Image (cartoon, helix red, strand yellow):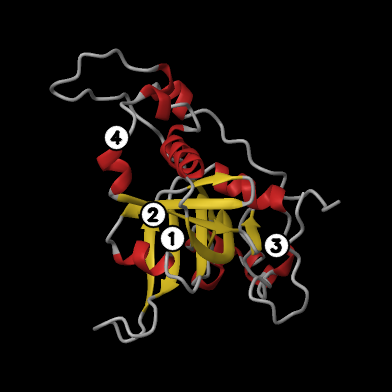
């Protein structure tokens, strides 16, 4: 298990608010990555890029993970792919999050979520090795299907597909995970105020993503794969123990 604990309080991955909700071990980071399908990738364009004025960019992307490396892919001439495959390896920040409940308090300043989130930092690297590229595309493909083997249950990429697609690898160099589990935390004084408690609702609203029955295309003639059935896609996620202590 890799430990990403910050070396000092100024480290980029140091959680500064609600530090008791933070984890810095790879078990926590990997669990959050494994259980989700959408990442937000933050980067800046290389100096001299026309008409961009150094704006930072954050793009939603599908992804996959192999050990301590996160892979993303895109069209070969896309600006993200060009930026992250430059000769001077650019810095990249990738975030992944999931919301499990709305926390509804009497005071809006105590509203919150129950959630898990991961923030990772690394440098972009263009994947040029054909074997690594194929493995990366496989895990990216399988990620949304709860890691079922959709890759090998598909028409595999041809030469044109591969030539038009770049794959970027980001090895996790620094990272943090953060979670919140539990109920409402209104001020103690207000929790004892019967008038307020009768007037303003407080509680927890669970949030769940639910997959429905597959709807075949107009030209489909194949049976529905078992891994697309709701009972597979909706099975409970295996999440790390948020209260576990690091070894």
Q: How far apart are marks 3 and 2 (CA)?
A: 24 Å
Residue pointed to by mark 3: 22
Q: What residue is shown at x 38% (from left), y 69% (from top)?
A: 83
Secondary element type, mark 2: strand
Q: Where residue 158 is drawn, which disc sits there?
A: 4
The answer to whether residue 120 is seen in the rendering is yes
Secondary element type, mark 1: strand
Question: Is residue 116 rendered to the left or right of residue 157?
Answer: right
Residue pointed to by mark 1: 40
How packed is label 1: few (under 14 Cα within 10 Å), some, or many (20 or more)? Answer: some
| Comes first in the chain, label 2 or label 4 | 2
Secondary element type, mark 4: loop
| Comes first in the chain, label 2 or label 1 | 1
Is 43 rendered above or below residue 157?
A: below
Of tags 4 and 1, the one toward the viewer is 4
How packed is label 3: few (under 14 Cα within 10 Å), some, or many (20 or more)? Answer: many
- Percent x, y of residue 237: 57, 35
Nearest the viewer among 63 and 194 is 63
Q: Quadrant of residue 78?
A: bottom left
Secondary element type, mark 3: strand
**Do callouts 4 and 1 mark residues in contact (Cβ within 8 Å)?**
no
Q: How far apart are marks 4 and 3 (CA)?
A: 43 Å
Q: Where residue 61 is drawn, which disc sits there?
A: 2
Q: What residue is shown at x 20% (from left), y 14% (from top)?
A: 221
| Comes first in the chain, label 3 or label 2 | 3
- Percent x, y of residue 151: 41, 30
- Percent x, y of residue 219: 14, 21
| Comes first in the chain, label 3 or label 1 | 3
- Percent x, y of residue 68: 63, 51
Q: Distance between the residues labelled 3 and 1?
A: 20 Å
């Amino acid at each position: 298990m890799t430990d990403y604990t910050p070396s000092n309080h100024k480290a980029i991955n140091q959680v500064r608010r609600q530090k008791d909700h933070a984890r810095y071990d790879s078990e926590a980071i990997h669990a959050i990555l494994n259980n989700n399908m959408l990442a937000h990738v933050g980067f800046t364009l290389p100096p001299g890029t026309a008409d961009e004025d150094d704006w930072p960019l954050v793009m939603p992307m599908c992804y996959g993970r192999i050990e301590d490396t996160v892979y993303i892919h895109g069209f070969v001439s896309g600006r993200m792919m060009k930026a992250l495959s430059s000769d001077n390896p650019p810095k990249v920040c990738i975030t992944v999050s999931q919301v499990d409940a709305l926390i509804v308090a009497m005071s809006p300043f105590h509203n919150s979520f129950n959630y898990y989130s991961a923030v990772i930092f690394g440098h972009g690297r263009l994947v040029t090795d054909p074997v690594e590229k194929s493995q990366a595309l496989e895990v990216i493909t399988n990620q949304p299907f709860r890691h079922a083997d959709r890759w090998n249950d598909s028409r595999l990429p041809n030469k044109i597909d591969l030539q038009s697609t770049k794959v970027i690898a980001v090895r996790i160099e620094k990272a943090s995970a953060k979670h919140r589990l539990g109920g409402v935390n209104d001020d103690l004084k207000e929790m004892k105020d019967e008038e307020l408690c009768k007037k303003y609702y407080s509680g927890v609203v669970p949030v769940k993503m639910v997959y429905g029955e597959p709807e075949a295309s107009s030209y489909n003639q194949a049976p529905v794969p078992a891994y697309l059935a709701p009972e597979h896609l909706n099975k409970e996620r295996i999440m790390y123990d948020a209260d576990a202590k690091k070894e």
